[in-house]
Image (cartoon, rainbow, N blue to C red):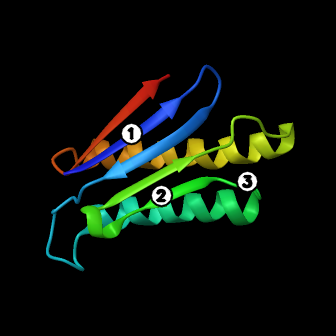
Amino acid sequence: MIQATIHRGSDRINSFQITGHADSGEYGQDIVCAAVSVLAITTVNGLQRVAKIPVTVDNRNQAGGFLEVHLPPKLEATTELKGQTLLQSFADGLRDVATNYADFIHLNEVVD
């Protein structure tokens, strides 16, 4: 099962972590894993390439599926808005996947 955690501060998403594998289908046919991977990779690429945010990324595929992403604590207002828009879209997408495939992904949203 995929375990996804989104860490929120009082007014922003600060980080997220995804671990595990969905195991909803054979390797290469797992639509839940594919959905979560596309959401996560697109979000990281958007944060780095579009919003130009220097996020900290820890990715360890060999450790059973692990991705952790942290935003810097302070950003310029326009950059912050771009980053939070991307992250909220990511959170909404994960929430939809978790609702429709609850046997394969658990989403936890934590307020730090």
Q: Earlier in the sequence, mark 3 or mark 2?
A: 3
Q: Residue at x 23, y 60 (%)?
A: 21
Cβ–Cβ below 8 Å for labels 3 and 2? no
Tell me where residue 63 appears, x and y as whole percent.
27, 63
Question: Looking at the rendered structure, which numbered label has been put on residue 58?
Answer: 2
Tell me where residue 10 appears, x and y as whole percent.
61, 19
Q: Earlier in the sequence, mark 2 or mark 1?
A: 1
Tell me where residue 49 appears, x and y as whole percent.
72, 66
Question: Looking at the rendered structure, which numbered label has been put on residue 21?
Answer: none
Does dot 1 land on a helix, a strand or a loop? strand
Is label 3 or label 2 in front? Answer: 2
Q: Residue at x 57, y 58 (%)?
A: 43
Q: Earlier in the sequence, mark 3 or mark 1?
A: 1
Is label 2 or label 1 in front? Answer: 2
Circle 2: is it few (<14), some (14-19), or many (20+) Cα within 10 Å?
A: few
> Looking at the image, which is closer to me, 85 or 74?
74
Question: Looking at the rendered structure, which numbered label has been put on residue 53?
Answer: 3
Establish if 82 lies above or below 41.
above
Q: Quadrant of residue 26?
A: bottom left
Establish if 9 lies above or below 90.
above
Give how far apart the Cα atoms at labels 2 and 1 are.
Answer: 14 Å
> Looking at the image, which is closer to me, 58 or 40?
58
> Looking at the image, which is closer to me, 28 or 52?
52
Question: Looking at the rendered structure, which numbered label has been put on residue 5?
Answer: 1
Q: Amino acid at mark 1?
A: Thr
Tell me where residue 72 appears, x and y as whole percent.
68, 42
